[in-house]
Amino acid sequence: MLRCALFLIVGQIALPALGADDQVVLKRIAFGSCAKQDQPQPIWAAIVESQPQLFVFLGDNIYGDSEDMDVLRAKYALLDSQPGLQQLKQTCRVIGTWDDHDYGANDAGAEYPKKRESQQVFLDFFGVSRDDPRRKQEGVYSSLVQGPPGKRVQIILLDVRYFRSPLKVGFKPGEPGDGYRGKYISNTDPGATLLGEAQWRWLEEQLKVPAELRIIGTGLQVIPDEHGSEMWGNFPRDRQRLFRLIRESRASGVVLISGDRHLAEISRLAAASPDGPGYPLFDVTSSSLNAPSGNITKAGVRFANEVNSYRVGLTFFDVNFGNIQIDWDLPDPLVRLQVRDEKGAVVLQQRVTLSQLRARPLQP
């Protein structure tokens, strides 16, 4: 028997009829990405200990990497058999979006030939009913709102795989000491897209839905745009379009959460940025749930040098999960954006009040 609150789903996504629980205030949200399904996942104990009301998978939920749907199903079954995940599912609702490996192929986009079939396997894993509109729409994007007026939290989960145009390679390394960089360069073709027009229209409507805090989840980092690995920065037109859409829709309270990178960090687009919404925009990246990265020093410390001029604080390379805590009882509600380690200790944090996430007036 699940003990978490029911949720009001907005837009194309529907759930069974709601009871009184749709007014329950959402105060604790956990999230994470990159789970090797065939390896131990002890981090679930710390996640359960943090008592989330909702857990969000942000992609690479399994490492499927196959065009055989039976292979994907078997790997989802391995993930589902993890005792810690089973315990979490008894305490809160689990939702998610996908990234490349659970979509079906490394760094894959619209060209992946089994995306329709993979979408159904993905929806099966998350227990989406057969009459849910996601069973017919292209892509796994979805949105929900939880809480009463004045304390509403909107969760928007984007699909950065189903419609994505081809990546372009050719990134040149910088000088020694500049930091690790991947192979991808910007795709500036006029028709290049990350989300596809149908999803863009849907997102525009979601940002008009009343909410005090909006958490936009995406498999790829949005704000960092220098490291040359997969990111929104591979498609600078769409990255700028997202920032512009947030600004022009007057959508306050937006926070970004992302995964994919096998590292954790918090990035910030400054309030003064001409591209931004007029308030600081944070991107909290949490990865991986059980596959750490980086180099290990003789002291056992993981590290790597990767360029990110938007980074606030340090980068954390060991296993981790993300956590958002909202203190609605304060006159100006406080949002804590956190990354926690395998034991549940807070290793990265940014504190921001809702008043700091309010849109500035549009210029004439």
Image (cartoon, rainbow, N blue to C red):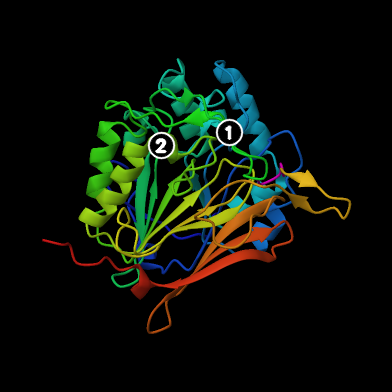
Residue type at mark 2: give it. Asp
Point 65% across, 47% down: residue: 86
Where is residue 190 shown, x and y percent of the image? 27, 27
Q: Is residue 324 magenta?
A: no
Q: Which residues are magenta?
A: 288-292
Of the image marks 2 and 1, the number of the one nearer the N terminus: 2
Q: Nearer the viewer, residue 92 or 173?
A: 173
Residue corresponding to mark 2: 159
Q: Nearer the viewer, residue 192 or 157?
A: 192
Q: Would residue 238 be found to the left or right of residue 128 on screen?
A: left
The furthest residue to the right: 298
Q: Would residue 319 be found to the left or right of residue 191 on screen?
A: right
Instruction: Tell me the distance, in whole angstroms, between the alpha carbons under discs 2 and 1.
Output: 22 Å
Q: Nearer the viewer, residue 28 or 85?
A: 28
Residue corresponding to mark 1: 182
Residue type at mark 1: give it. Gly
Point 50% across, 59% down: residue: 4
Where is residue 344 shown, x and y percent of the image? 69, 63
Where is residue 325 shown, x and y percent of the image? 51, 68
Which mark, by number, is residue 289? none
Main secondary structure along the magenta-highlighted residues: loop
The furthest residue to the bottom: 331
Where is residue 155 shown, x and y percent of the image? 39, 53
Q: In terms of secondary structure, where does tag 1 sit?
A: loop
Count every numbered label the image shows and give the total. Answer: 2
55 lies above or below 153: above
Point 54% across, 41% down: residue: 227
Q: Is residue 291 magenta?
A: yes
Q: Quadrant of residue 165?
A: top left
The furthest residue to the front: 175
Q: Would residue 222 be found to the left or right of residue 319 on screen?
A: left
Whether pointer 2 and pointer 1 mark residues with C-beta atoms closer than 8 Å, the reply is: no
